[in-house]
Image: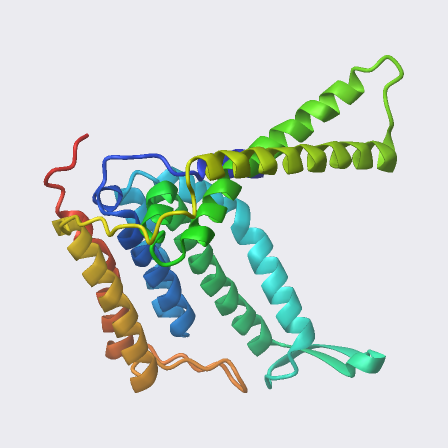
Amino acid sequence: MRAVAASRRVVYRRRASPLHAARAPVAAAYGSALAASALIVQNPVLLGALLCAVLVAAAASGLGRDLLGAARVTVLPIVLVTVLVNVLVSRGGLTVFARLGDWGVLGQMNLTVEAVVYGLVFALRLLVVTLACLLVVCTADPDELLFAFRRVSPRSALTAALATRLIPVLSQDAQRLAEAQRCRPDGGARGARGVLAILRATVGGALERSLDVAAVLEMRGYGASGRAPRARHAFSRHDLAFAAAAVALVGLSVLTAVSGAAPFSAYPLVSLPLGTPALAVAALLLVLSAVPFADRRGIEP
């Protein structure tokens, strides 16, 4: 129930924040830059800084409770799955804390501290990427985002728009059909037969809806005109600030990974030098992600 309640809160709603004031592609690029930075860097200190950056961005956007709720629901499964799988699969590492013997085709099963550490770091990276994607979902208007990509691939944009509208409708149809089946005097078909009956009715309804939508689009002349005209709107200061922050975050992450300013190695022994460059990069990542939220001019409460 807690997972369902948390998932219901993670939806787009217009809020009074600089990130919501930016256009949808820019907001999506900002969240994607945070996720991409987490995929580029490996140092857990930098990943922790990016996690703080995502949470700070969520709090500044009025989404602090939503993302914290989602984090509480997802952090334990992510950590358990990544650590368990990596410990059982990885054969690297010199610090063995458990010898489980020969497991046949899997070979000698030795559990190492290094495998646990790498699993924890991978779980941290996956958590940052997940929360950054949720930040995009909550701050980028899906309609505006699809509208912005109509010139690149209008059919794909239309397909995505229809899917996001029709999938919830089909889900509601399936729920109503299941309730109607349970209300029958004989109880209706149960088990696999009942599920197949509901699925058959839902798929039939989806096909009928698709024909209706196609007929409406044909009547409105979809596909008869040329390429959609370009909508010319000047970039606002919020657009420029978040776009610059996204470029700076990815650029700094790439530069750090290439230069080796924040090294980290889990195998064969854990190596995590906490020097000034690593701490400086972590602080800079946090500052770059938070600076665009400082300008709240024109944001209506």
Q: Is residue 4 visible?
A: no
116 relative to 20, above or below: below
Q: Quadrant of residue 67?
A: top left
At horizontal 21% and vertical 55% (from top left) the residue drawn is: 242
- Residue 264 on image: x %, y %: 41, 80
Find the residue positioned furthest to the left. Answer: 297
- In the displayed structure image, the side of residue 89 where residue 197 appears, left or right: right
161 relative to 95, above or below: above
**Total numbered labels placed on residues in the image:** 0
Find the residue positioned furthest to the right. Answer: 186
- Residue 62 on image: x %, y %: 30, 38
- Residue 197 on image: x %, y %: 81, 32
At horizontal 72% and vertical 21% (from top left) the residue drawn is: 179
At horizontal 78% and vertical 83% (from top left) the residue drawn is: 107
Q: Give whichever of 174, 260 is nearer the camera.
A: 174
- In the displayed structure image, the side of residue 50 where residue 18 appears, left or right: left
232 relative to 162, above or below: below
The image quadrant where one finds the C terminus is top left
Q: Is residue 96 visible?
A: yes
Q: Give whichever of 254, 183 is nearer the camera.
A: 183
- Residue 290 on image: x %, y %: 22, 54
The image quadrant where one finds the N terminus is top right
Q: Quadrant of residue 185?
A: top right
Q: Quadrant of residue 208?
A: top right
Q: How is the image coloured?
A: rainbow
